[in-house]
């Protein structure tokens, strides 16, 4: 048995029908003028580029100006049938014009004209600024025709392109499919956090590869190390350690990049502390800046020794490039990171929240930034003293350095000894036959923080 429709429901339905039948508010003269001016600008930009690049016997600036204005008129009228008719007419005219010229091979100009119509339409909507921005980007791509052809056909290899697809699949295919939330004992397993670490390791390795390829190791690796230090020093250490294992002849270059990345961690922590607790930041500024200065000094000394060693062989630095992305090493780092997460959570749970130094150490194994923010909050609420908070921050950084030393030993070689790296006076050279793929990646623990 069906329920009868109430009078209130009927009134609501009639009101909705009246609202749907009401015409949309008409644009003001100022809005019409603004949309037309923006459409003219878009048509001018695209048309000028196509006319300058192709010359006669192709749609030129006046054609693109008219196409963009027609799109703006369609956007102002908001009549779907009129918009479809205008777009079909423009497409038909472009098709006839294209087939009348026998030597034409591509359809870039025709597609640019259709895009110009769409950009003109958007100028009459709330997305007008976005339309102009996208139009500028499109003009940039059209102007960079020769550079793009050279990049795709000559510069980028098939291996690099395939590795780029795999790298993008990590981010846009696998990551969204992972479940959210914490799982397992002590809630240690957070799939998205672990996979984010895998993405960070892969990103630093991927970006560092292309920076080194296009800028050279002398400029590319330091820039990649700075970006890695800002993103994640743990991921940067893992990425550079893996690269040193795959390219043992470039050991010193990757060692220097790792030192730079880890030196960036200290001012990054200091900025975080200034944002959350000014008192703790002021108390920590001297030790943090001192550690940063020590790391940068070592990086400078390594640069001088690297140039001295490479000068007799070649004027440039020697970094042999192989693959920008490999799936298996990234997955191994994810498993290692998961194991360390479990150990850190278990130790912190068993030690208890009252033992602050122990908690800081074990939490620092996972994330030095997070424990620094936690200590700042405890200090702000008067739960701990300033001296205890500073000690906890420094102890977390020491623990984070221990973690990265383990990761460097795992990624660089299984025979890494931190004590040996402290006493080593001379690194093995690429010409030494004993300097094989298993060469150690020396990271002193006091500089691997």
Image (cartoon, rainbow, N blue to C red):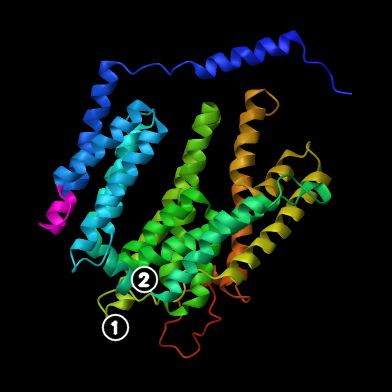
Range of magenta residues: 49-60
Total residue callouts: 2
Q: Residue at x 79, y 49 (%)?
A: 183
Q: Foreground residue, 185 or 418?
A: 185
Decide if residue 5 is in sight here. yes
Residue 251, disc:
none
Q: Residue at x 47, y 39 (%)?
A: 286
Is 126 above or below relative to 296?
Answer: above
Q: Foreground residue, 252 or 220?
A: 220
Element class at badge 1 = loop
Check whether the beta carbons of the residues at disc 1 and disc 2 lie within 8 A of each other: no
Q: Quadrant of the C terminus?
A: bottom right
Decide if residue 365 is in sight here. no
On the image, numbered disc 2 is attached to which residue?
A: 156
Residue most toward the right?
1
Q: Residue at x 18, y 41 (%)?
A: 44
Element class at badge 2 = loop
Is 350 above or below relative to 8?
Answer: below
Q: How far, Cα to Cα, is label 1 from label 2? A: 27 Å
> Where's residue 413, x and y in %?
59, 75
Q: Of tags 1 and 2, which is closer to the observer?
A: 2
Residue 313, disc:
1
> Where's residue 319, x and y in %?
38, 74
In the displayed structure image, the side of residue 48 where residue 336 appears, left or right: right
């Amino acid at each position: 048995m069906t329920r009868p429709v109430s009078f209130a429901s009927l009134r609501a339905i009639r009101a909705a029908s009246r609202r749907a039948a009401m015409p949309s508010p008409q644009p003001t003269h100022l809005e019409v003028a603004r949309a037309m001016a923006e459409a003219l600008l878009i048509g001018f930009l695209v048309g000028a580029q196509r006319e300058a690049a192709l010359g006669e016997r192709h749609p030129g600036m006046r054609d693109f100006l008219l196409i963009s204005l027609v799109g703006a008129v369609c956007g102002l009228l908001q009549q779907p049938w009129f918009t479809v008719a205008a777009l079909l007419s423009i497409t038909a005219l472009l098709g006839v014009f294209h087939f009348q010229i026998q030597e034409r091979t591509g359809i870039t100009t025709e597609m640019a004209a259709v895009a110009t119509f769409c950009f003109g339409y958007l100028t009459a909507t709330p997305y007008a600024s976005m339309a102009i921005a996208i139009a500028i980007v499109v003009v940039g791509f059209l102007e960079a025709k020769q550079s793009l052809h050279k990049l795709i056909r000559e510069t980028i290899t098939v291996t690099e392109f395939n590795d780029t697809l795999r790298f993008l699949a990590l981010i846009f295919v696998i990551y969204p499919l992972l479940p959210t939330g914490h799982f397992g004992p002590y809630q240690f397993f957070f799939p998205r956090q672990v996979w984010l670490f895998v993405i960070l390791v892969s990103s630093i390795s991927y970006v560092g590869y292309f920076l080194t390829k296009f800028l050279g190791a002398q400029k590319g690796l330091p820039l990649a190390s700075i970006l890695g230090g800002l993103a994640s020093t743990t991921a940067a250490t893992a990425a550079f350690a893996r690269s040193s294992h795959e390219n043992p002849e470039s050991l010193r270059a990757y060692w220097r990049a790792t030192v730079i990345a880890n030196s960036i961690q200290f001012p990054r922590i200091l900025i975080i502390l200034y944002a959350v607790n000014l008192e703790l930041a002021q108390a920590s500024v001297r030790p943090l800046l001192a550690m940063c200065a020590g790391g940068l000094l070592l990086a400078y000394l390594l640069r001088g020794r690297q140039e001295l060693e490479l000068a007799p062989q070649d004027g440039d630095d020697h970094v042999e490039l192989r693959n920008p992305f490999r799936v298996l090493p990234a997955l191994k780092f994810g498993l290692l990171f998961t194991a360390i997460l479990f150990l850190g959570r278990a130790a912190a749970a068993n030690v208890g929240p009252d033992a602050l130094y122990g908690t800081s150490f074990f939490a620092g194994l996972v994330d030095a930034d997070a424990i620094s923010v936690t200590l700042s909050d405890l200090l702000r609420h008067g739960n701990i003293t300033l001296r205890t908070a500073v000690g906890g921050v420094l102890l977390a950084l020491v623990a984070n350095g221990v973690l990265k030393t383990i990761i460097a030993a795992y990624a660089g070689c299984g025979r890494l000894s931190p004590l040996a790296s402290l006493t080593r006076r001379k690194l093995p050279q690429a010409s030494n036959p004993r300097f094989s793929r298993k060469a150690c990646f020396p990271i002193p623990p006091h500089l691997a923080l």
